[in-house]
Image (cartoon, grey):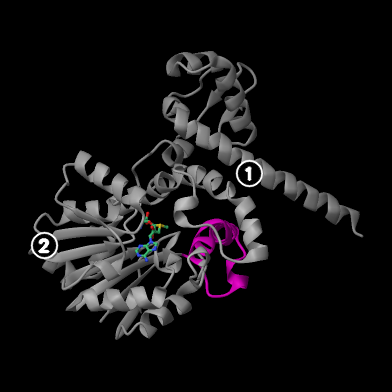
Amino acid sequence: MDKTRIREFADRVYRDNAGAMAVGMADLGTRTGLFRAMQGQGAMTPEALAEATGLQPRYVGEWLRGMAAAEYLTYDAADGSFTLPNEHAYLLASEGTDHFMGGLFRFAPVLLSVAGPVAEAFHKGGGVQFDQFSDDLVEALDMINGGTYETRLAGYWLAQLPDIVVRLEQGGRALDVGCGAGRVSMALARAFPEAAIAGLDPDAGSIARANELAEAAGLARISFVEGTTGAIRDEAFDLVTLCDVMHDLPDPGATLAQIRSLLSEDGVLFVVEPKAADTLEDNINPLGAMYYGFSLFHCMTQSLACGGPGLGTCMGPTQSMDLLARAGFSRVEQLPIRSVTNLFYAARP
Ligand SMILES: C[S@@+](CC[C@H](N)C(=O)[O-])C[C@H]1O[C@@H](n2cnc3c(N)ncnc32)[C@H](O)[C@@H]1O
């Protein structure tokens, strides 16, 4: 055996474990407000940060040292101070924006906590259902996606569908399927005050959170419904959105066909999916590794748990477009929207 290769791979394993611990420490940084407290403050001593936040000095000191070792913070050995660089604060202390990355820190521990049941599913089949994850799941998904939907959907993404924008401006109807915490519906309601907006999700916890957030935002006119597309009848929607949902569906063919029948003749299904390539060789990169992990610990397993096909997070554009075409959509196109993490499709009945 090549000893250098063994040493190099051992380093890699340490690095990956360091990454896992960095995720946990960074989650503590967002939960406790430590990143926020350091934002724009320049160099801070542990004592000053503990005083500013009212947090326990021993925990704050160890967190600062850990985050410096992970290179999230810089450390000045001359005076023992720590700094959160502005460029890092832009990603770590920017809740509600489209550049906030803190939701990923909340998501990972939720996923890894089901490693036992997922390992069992390797033997027995099935998987872990959506409602068997911890209560943090819905909040984590909202933290990951919410800011992006609120800032990008109506003004930027939907610019690709000018006919639909005109109809919603004049009071059309939109439905967000798999609405989670409801941010897509909220973004649509804000952008199109004349339109009738509904969100649909079979998860009771998601609907409760969506109602709470919408009410707090003065958007109680949005109708959030607990259920699946089969529960909605006789409505002709101008726009149906399916954001980070298609690959999760337990019966994608049936759900897509139902969505097609819910659209008006000239309506559009707008689909947002994770940005994965068609082939594994093109997914061998950090985003691909992250998404395969999301798939095993969440997307694939929760679909298999319901007897679904477990399409997984890395389905890729060819399979996505094929699914839409097989569900009977006559015009399916990939939209030229630039994003690091997502791919976008429009499907017309
Ligand atoms: C990954 S989450 C995405 C939530 C939200 N759209 C977002 O982007 O943050 C997938 C959502 O699809 C919902 N879902 C699962 N099966 C569904 C179905 N058959 N019909 C509608 N929604 C479904 C889940 O309850 C969950 O809220």
Would you say residue 331 is visible in this rendering?
Answer: yes
Q: Which residue type carries mark 2?
A: Glu
Quick one: SS at disc 2? Answer: helix
Neighbor class of circle 2 (other Cα within 10 Å; few <14, some 14-19, many 20+) is few
User: Magenta stretch: dominant SS?
Assistant: helix
For disc 2, the marked residue is: 169
Magenta stretch: residue 283 in it?
yes
Q: Which mark is residue 60?
A: none
Q: Quadrant of residue 257?
A: bottom left
Q: Position of residue 164 (x, y in %)?
A: 18, 70
Q: Which residues are magenta?
A: 275-303
Q: Position of residue 129 (x, y in %)?
A: 49, 57
Q: Quadrant of residue 156?
A: bottom left
Cα distance in 3D space between marks 2 and 1: 46 Å
- The residue drawn where x is 31% and y is 83% is 329
- Name the residue nearer the viewer: 159 or 290: 290
Please tell me which of labels 2 and 1 falls first in the chain. 1
Disc 1 within 8 angstroms of ligand 1 (CB): no
Q: Position of residue 6 (x, y in %)?
A: 85, 53
Magenta stretch: residue 313 in it?
no
Neighbor class of circle 1 (other Cα within 10 Å; few <14, some 14-19, many 20+) is few
Judged left or right of residue 88, residue 327 is left
For disc 1, the marked residue is: 19
Judged left or right of residue 340, residue 155 is left
